[in-house]
Amino acid sequence: MYASKYYAKTHEEIVYNLDEYQCPYCGHWFMVDITFCQYSPTDDYDDYVKIFCPYCGKFHRVAI
């Protein structure tokens, strides 16, 4: 599966769990991994994740 032993030791495979999400501002649908967003830093909001809409460019928070 791996090309070499070095590659196996230094690289990590990340599996994304993408879900459809609709932006509350512009209404466009896009794919986002909520569990991956939980690891991004937020401004003292432990119960929310910060999501960036690629269409309108706005950040909004969603309760987890």
Image: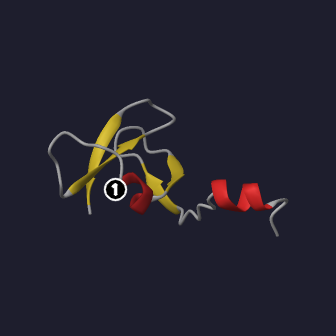
Whether residue 11 can be seen here: no
Residue drawn at x 80%, y 64% is 2
Q: Is residue 12 left or right of residue 51?
A: right
Q: Position of residue 25 (x, y in %)?
A: 35, 39
Of all residues shown, which one is farthest toward the left? 44
Residue 31, quarter of the rendered image: bottom right
Image location of residue 1, percent across then percent down = 82, 70
**Residue at point 25% right, 42% down?**
42
How is colour applied across the structure in the image?
Answer: secondary structure
> In the drawing, does residue 22 fall left or right of residue 39?
right
Q: Is residue 56 above or below residue 37?
A: above
**Residue annotated with mark 1:** 38
Q: Locate residue 8: give its quadrant.
A: bottom right
Question: Depth check: 46 or 18 in front?
Answer: 46
> Closer to the camera, 25 or 30?
30
Q: Secondary structure at mark 1?
A: loop
Q: How many marks?
A: 1
Q: Which residue lies at the image location 82% right of the left edge and 59% below the top edge?
A: 4
Q: Residue at x 61, y 59 (%)?
A: 12
Amino acid type, mark 1? Gln
Locate residue 55 relative to residue 45 in the image: left or right: right
Q: Is the residue marked by circle 1 packed among few (<14), some (14-19), or many (20+) residues within 10 Å? A: some
Residue at the far front: name it: 5
Farthest residue in the bottom direction? 1
Residue 63 x, y percent position in the rendering: 23, 59
Relative to the observer, which residue lies in front, 1 or 59? Answer: 1
Note whether residue 3 is visible: yes
Q: Which quadrant does the C terminus fall into?
A: bottom left
Residue 62 x/y as whole percent:
28, 53
